[in-house]
Amino acid sequence: MKMDNVPLKVKLILYIGFSVLIVMVATTAIIISATTSQHEDLAYKKSIEKASNYANQFNSDMQSNMAIARTIASTLTVYNSSDRKEANAFLREILIDNPNLIGTYAGFEPNAFDGRDAEFVNVAPEHDSTGRFVPYWNKIGGTMFVEPLIDYDTLDYYQLPKKLEEEVLTEPYMYQGELIASYVVPIMRNDEFVGIGGVDVSLNYIDEIVSNVTAFEEGYAFTTSNTGILLSHPVHKEWIGTKTLNDFNDPQVAKMADDILVGKGGHIETIDPTTGEDAIIFYEPVRTGNYSFILVIPKDDMLADVTALRNDLILISSLALIFMAGAAYLVAMSITRPINEIVSNFAYISDSALKGDLKRRAETDVEVDFRKIPSGLNDILDSLQTYSDELEEANEELKSLDQMKDSFLSNVSHELRTPLTSIKGYTQNVYDGTLGDINDLQRTALGTVLRNSDRLRRLVDSLLYVSQAQAEIIEYNFRECRLMEIVNNTIMDTVMLVEANGLHLKKKIPSELPPIIADEARITDMLNNLIDNAIKFTPEGGVITLGAFEEDKYLHITVSDTGIGIPEDLIPNLFSKFYQIDSSIRRKYGGTGLGLYICKEIVDAHSGEIWIESRPDEGTTVHIRLPK
């Protein structure tokens, strides 16, 4: 067929359509390639920058710690007083002034401090058996104390600075159950090594920070020492301090371990040992100590935006091709105006819809051939608007139900208090003989009723406290009060229940304790809850001890028992609302799981601290610190 015989309209359509098709295909391919490549590079740069920022943060922390060690060493280098007590007090003050430290120490060669080692042979606690001045102040376990340095004749923290005559940051090591690193600086006098000064830092804070680091949707982070020992991990806490990168038996991970050993950063692609997914692992050195910050990101997660962008571009480009082909046809047919109006109208509506405005509608006053397009869009928008309204209504109903639940809980708790008060009052009158004589068997039964009514009252008070806490309507009456009076009231409240369970209640509280500003009723409730817990979990014949002592700006209260104890890994969960250790505990000992939650709420309201120390089969101690 000769082109001369083809109508001009058809030729125009073919020419425009083919030209547009060629241009759009080429342009689209270039745009997709360039844009996705840029976004992929951006994702890599973003990940590297995140890893580098955290590495720099930890590097700054380590430099600060080394600066403290330098301060200790430089001070003791020029120290001329030869006063061991004064030098010992200096180390203690450094530990107090720097809460990030877990230990401070100094160690001198024989007779290098003041030439008087023979006078201090076996003089505890800052000397060894030869009288060398080797004080080690630490707060491992929470209590600060001093003891002599150990194994300094073999361990790196002493021998490396002595051998190298330069600063040393040791490899992480376990000491008394704590994963720590030592920052050590040699003490040099007249270019001769005379000892060391240094600090210990717990590496637990690294795990606390790094375990909360996220990247993209599913990425996580951990850290290692320069030899590949894991210092943190968000999931496998048992790997910390025990597992190295080489233990994963992965060639790529082994390459990363080699880079980390020489302080080099980079990234690898491998299988994530935690999830088993393809992942990109970025690692950046922490220059001080040659540690490394490692960011693990699932490959699909990291490149999800790139993939989505590429798909969107392909879709948009495909739609554009269709649109341009249609435009060519419409131009040829001289009907471009309605198409432009519809496209403009659609863009306006889509912008509004993307901003959450579903009330705008497409203009239907268009050519009859195109009228179904805006009408169909309006039908979709109507459906979306209806669905949105229904969701909003359902959400309001849920809020109302939640408020009704809180109100019901509060009302029931209030309503139960009145009959409980009457039950206890009349039972107490009968028990005391006010309403007539009773025999021993009846008195025993009434004692059981009184104890259980007290227990039920505490349960009602707990539920009421929780409902008020959720409603944020709890009020505290802070005033000056004496701890001894609070403890005596608590003992009077609980002694009957303690004795009924065959237990002994002791108190170890000095009478000269200063007053505290507190809500006396709330503190009494807290101690009642703690003693009630101790009663439940202490076998017959056991001892519950209430103790208190003055500590800096606080009063330190302890409630100890000789009960069944608690596994260490479960202790962090104990202050959660309604938490029980396991179903067997719940069946055997009962309880709502609210006691410790309420105790923590009360302590927090007093700007105090509460924590638990426990060992299975040895007993439990609850510590409370309240400001004076």
Image: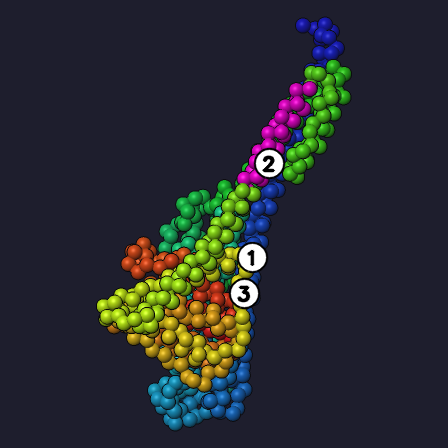
Disc 3 and disc 1 in contact, CB within 8 angstroms = no
Amino acid type indicated by mark 2: Asp
Determine the secondary structure under disc 2. helix
Amino acid type indicated by mark 1: Ser
Instruction: Tell me the CA gap for discs 3 and 2.
Output: 39 Å
What segment carries the magenta color? 371-395
Q: Name the residue rendered at 40%, 60% in the picture.
A: 419
Q: Name the residue rendered at 30%, 71% in the picture.
A: 436
Name which of mark 1 and mark 2 comes first in the sequence.
1
Q: Quadrant of the N terminus?
A: top right
* Residue 511: % across, % down: 43, 84
Q: Taking 219 as reference, is 353 left or right? A: right
Determine the secondary structure under disc 1. helix
Amino acid type indicated by mark 3: Glu
Q: Is residue 315 magenta?
A: no
Q: Is residue 392 magenta?
A: yes
- Which residue in the structure is indicated by mark 2? 389
- Which residue in the structure is indicated by mark 3? 475
Determine the secondary structure under disc 3. loop
Q: Taking 166 as reference, is 533 left or right? A: left
* Residue 205: % across, % down: 48, 64
